[in-house]
Amino acid sequence: MLYTFYSSFLSDHISFLHEYFFSRIKVFILYITRLFLQTIPISIFHNYNTMSFSSQEDIFDDTFYKFFGMHIPNPAPIEIYSLQNEGNNPYDALQQSCLHSSTTNLDQTPVNDLLDNISREAEPSDIEINNSSSSPSSVRGRSYDSFCGIPSYDSPITKPSSFYNDLQLRADTTSPLTLLKAKKYLVVLVGLPASGKSSVAKHLIDYLDQNNVLGQPIRSGIYNAGDVRRSSVIITNGPIIIPNGSVEDDIFNPRNAKKKEEFARVALDSLLHDMANDVIDLAIFDATNSTIERRNYIWNVLRTFNNESNIMVTPLVLEVSCDKSEYIKYNVHNKAFNKDYCGNPYSSSILDFAKRLLYYKKQFTPFNEIEYPLLSSASNGNIFHFRISNAGISSVGNMIMFNKDIFDLETNLLIREIEKFSSNYHRYYGYCYTDRVENFFDNCTSNKQTPSVKAENIQRDYYRKVLSEIFNSSFLETLRMTNVELSCGGSGEQAIHIANNSI
Ligand SMILES: Nc1ncnc2c1ncn2[C@@H]1O[C@H](COP(=O)(O)OP(=O)(O)OP(=O)(O)O)[C@@H](O)[C@H]1O
Ligand SMILES: O=P(O)(O)OC[C@H]1O[C@](O)(CO)[C@@H](O)[C@@H]1O
C-alpha cells in the first residue's frame, strides 16, 4: 500500500516536473528561434479570415511572460497592415475603412495639394492666452475606471494595397542619426466633442501602466486644449464667450475658429516643452483636432521639433467616434456637469452643447488616408492610425505601417500594445461604460423603491426628457449627415436654429 502511495506520488510529481521543464524548454527554443528571426526583415501579411497574427503572437508572449516575467522582444522590421475586412481583397479593405467616401480614390492630387501646404504656418491670433493652465490635465499613476480582465486578442489583419507602398516611398528618408535620438510618443486624438476622447485617453494611460508595456514605467500626460480655453474664456449662463467679445461671440462658432487654434497651440507648446525637458515619454493631445488644417499644423510643428531637438517624437492618431444616439445623449448629459457649465440650468447646458456639436460637425473632417503622407513625413515614414467607435462595440479598423528601413523594438512593442488596446477596447474598458448607458436609459420598474431611489428616478426622468427633446430624431439626423440642408420645426430644432442663425 505504501509502495502504491509512493509510486503514485512520484509519478504524479515526475509528470508535473516533466511538463514544467518541458514547457520551459519549449518556450526557450521558441525564443531562440525568434531572436534568430530578428535578423531577417520580414513582412507579415495575414488575412484575419484565416488566421490571426495577434492571437498566435500573444499566446507565445503570454507564456513567455509567465516564465520570464517580461515581454518578449518583437521580431525586427515587421509591417502590420491592419484593416477591418470582410473579404479577401486588400483594396476593398482600404475602401471599407475609409470614413470619407470622396477621398477613397487613388488619385494623388489631393495628397499633392496637402503636401504643398506642408510648410504653411498657423496664423497668429490677437488673443492672449494664459499659459499657466497648460500643464497636463492628467498624469500616469492615477486610477481610472477599473481595468478589467486578462486580455485575449483577436485583431483583424489584412494585406495592404500597393497604394500604401507608394505612400511609404514618399516618406522622408530617415537619417541614421535620428535613431540615436531620445524616443517619445505623441497620441493625437481626433473626434467630435463628447465622443469619449478624454475617457479613452485616460484608459489608454491606465492600460499602458497596467501592462508595463516597455518593462519600465511610461511617464505620460494628457494635454487638453479645453483646459487652456477654460482659463481664457468667460463662462456665462449661456454660450461660452471670448473676452472682449459680444454675447454672440460663442467660442465654438466657426467664425471664432482662429481663436480656438490659439488654445490648441498653447496646449501643444506646453506638451512639447514637457517633452523637451524630459518630463514625459508619451503625451496625449486632447482636442477635437477636427480639421485637416489643424492636423497639418500639428505635423508641421512636430517635424520642426524633431529636426531641431535631440528628441524623436513618433506621432500616432487615435480617432474616437460615437454615433449611437443613446451614447451621444448620455455623453452630453455628463458634459452638462463639467466646468463649462457648472451651476447652469441643465436644459440650457444641454442646448448649448447640442449647438457646439453642430458647429463642430459642420467643419469636421475625419482623419483619412489622404493625410497619411503628411503624418508619415512627421513620423520617420511610419503611419499609426487607430480607431475606436462607440466605445469599441462598432468594428472599425486600424492602420499600422512601419517604415521598413528602421528597426525600432520599443516602438514596435508600444504600437502592438496600442493596437491591442484599441481593437479590444470594449472588452477592457468600454463595457463598463455601455452598462452605465444601459442603466441610465433603463426604465426601473422595481416596486421596492426607497425614497432616495425614487428621487433619483424622478431626477433621471427629467434628464432623459430634456435630452430627448433637444436630441430629438431630426436633430440627431442633422448631426449624422454632413452638409445637409437644415430645416427648422419641432421643439428639438432650437439648437439647429441657433447654430444656423449665428454662422
Ligand atoms: N469610453 C468611455 N468610457 C467612460 N465614459 C465615457 C466614455 N465615452 C464617453 N463617456 C462619458 O461621456 C462623457 C463625455 O466623454 P469625454 O469627456 O471623454 O468626451 P470628449 O470627446 O473628450 O469630449 P470633449 O471633446 O467635449 O472634451 C464623459 O464624461 C463620460 O461620462
Ligand atoms: O481645439 P479643438 O480641436 O476645437 O478642441 C478643443 C475643444 O474641444 C472640446 O473638448 C470640445 O468640447 C473643448 O473642451 C475644447 O475647447
Image: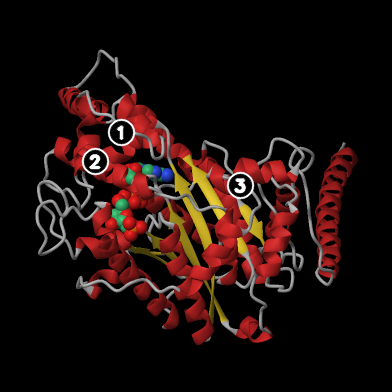
Q: Secondary structure at mark 2?
A: helix
The amino acid beneath tag 2 is Asn
Which class describes the residues within 10 Å of circle 1: few (<14), some (14-19), or many (20+)?
some
Q: Choose top left, top right, bottom left or bottom right for residue 135.
A: bottom left
Residue 463 position in % (x across, y down): 21, 30
Judge left or right: residue 225 versus residue 399.
left
Residue 486 is tagged as 1
| Residue at mark 3 | 104
Along the viewing direction, whichever of 433 and 364 lies nearer the viewer: 364
Q: Which residue shows up at 33% across the image and 72% down it?
A: 123
Q: Which residue shows up at 24% across the image and 62% down it?
A: 229
Q: Is residue 188 above or below residue 493?
A: below
Residue 501 is tagged as none
Residue 15 position in % (x across, y down): 86, 47
Screen quadrant of the N terminus: top right
Q: Which residue shows up at 17% across the image and 24% down it?
A: 458
Q: Choose top left, top right, bottom left or bottom right for residue 84.
A: top right
| Residue at mark 2 | 500
- Name the outermost residue toward the top: 447
